[in-house]
Amino acid sequence: MSEPVSQFVKPVTNSGRAKILSLHEAVALCVHDGDTVAMEGFTHLIPYAAGHEVIRQQRKHLQLIRMTPDILYDQLIGMGCADKLMFSWGGNPGVGSLHRFRDAVENGWPHALEIEEHSHAAMANAYDAGAAGLPCAVFRGYVGAELIRVNKNIKSIQCPFTGETLATVPAIRPDVAIVHAQRADRQGNVMFEGIVGVQKEAVLAAKRSIITVEEVVADFGARNRNAVILPSWTVTAIACVPGGAHPSYAQGYSRRDNNFYIAWDKIARDRNQFLSWMQTHVMQGR
């Protein structure tokens, strides 16, 4: 097997207009062994195609971040890409557990996985802090919560103005953020529509970013009132990957594949069946 591309590509930071590349080129350029990687998307616009390319390029020792890791992270963990996961909820939405995630935590297969669990509020605020260039997030939360006993990164401070005790967590500042969106224009600006989570904050907080899109257009045209536009200078690489969010969905382009989420529960329960499925559908799926 050929040597990983990451050995021959130096880390980059964004400076100027985003590059429009193939997905293979974008991952080779931006994702390196040992990176802290955030792949965000909330219910829809989950960057499955990009995550699969990370698996194909056999990235290792990643520290994964995601507020709601679902099947994509189950696949990354099961293929041995991750050493650590920071999250605030994990599961196969509407179905049940993530069996590869559980196997890694409970049995160390394919190797041990360190976990750092937070609340949704903590992670959302931590992304905000990272996007703002702050060292930590300060917010009301974790009062009476037991996570404080097992997560050393949850601390408290006293407000210098009111004396109130507030929670604080380190800012999230990934090496690379990966998200999916509906459109990019030819200048490298990116538009999200529909349900959005923390994609904007993740990209702004990251050193590098990959945005996969349904299409590249000359002009965005009419847009929803809740549309989010990332200017070109915030993005490192754009890859046009129609259907790149499947089995999640992209509003206006595709529907959620509910049957796949149900089927994954059986696929992921058995190690050999999981590996066989990944070999057929991901490793050979370029």
Image: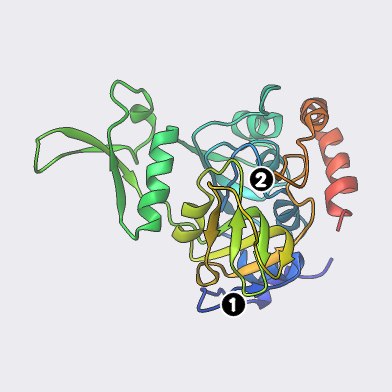
Query: Which circle marks residue 255 in the picture?
Result: none
42 and 101: which one is in front? 42
Which image quadrant: the C terminus? bottom right
Say what amino acid the circle numbered 2 marks.
Answer: Ile
Whether 217 is drawn above or below 243: the answer is below
Q: In the image, is residue 245 above or below residue 121?
A: below
Q: Nearer the viewer, residue 11 or 273?
A: 11
Tell me the quarter of the image containing the N terminus.
Answer: bottom right
Of the numbered discs 2 and 1, the one sitting upstream in the chain is 1
Q: Is residue 70 left or right of residue 229?
A: right
Task: From this view, report whether residue 36 is shown above or below residue 88.
Answer: below
**Left or right placement of residue 236 versus residue 284 in this view:** left
Q: Total of numbered circles in the picture?
A: 2
- Looking at the rendered structure, the secondary structure element under dot 1 is loop
The picture places residue 131, in percent across and down from the top left corner, at 40, 57
Q: Can you give x and y, in whole percent of width and height, for residue 199 in the image? A: 54, 50
Task: Give me the residue at 9% from left, 42% from top.
Answer: 161
Q: Is residue 75 among the parts visible in the rendering?
A: yes
- Image point (81%, 32%), residue name: 260
Query: Left or right: where does residue 1 sit relative to residue 45?
Result: right
Residue 148 horizontal/vertical position (percent): 33, 29
Q: Taking 185 as reference, is 68 left or right?
A: left
Mark 1 Cα-neighbour bin, 10 Å: few <14, some 14–19, many ≥20: few
Along the viewing direction, whichever of 153 and 23 lies nearer the viewer: 23
Q: Which mark is residue 10?
A: 1
Rendered residue at 78%/57% (across/down): 56
Tell me, yes or no, if residue 37 can be seen here.
no
Q: Nearer the viewer, residue 262 or 37?
A: 262
For disc 2, the marked residue is 46
Q: How is colour applied across the structure in the image?
A: rainbow
Helix, strand or loop at mark 2: loop
- Rendered residue at 31%/50% (across/down): 136
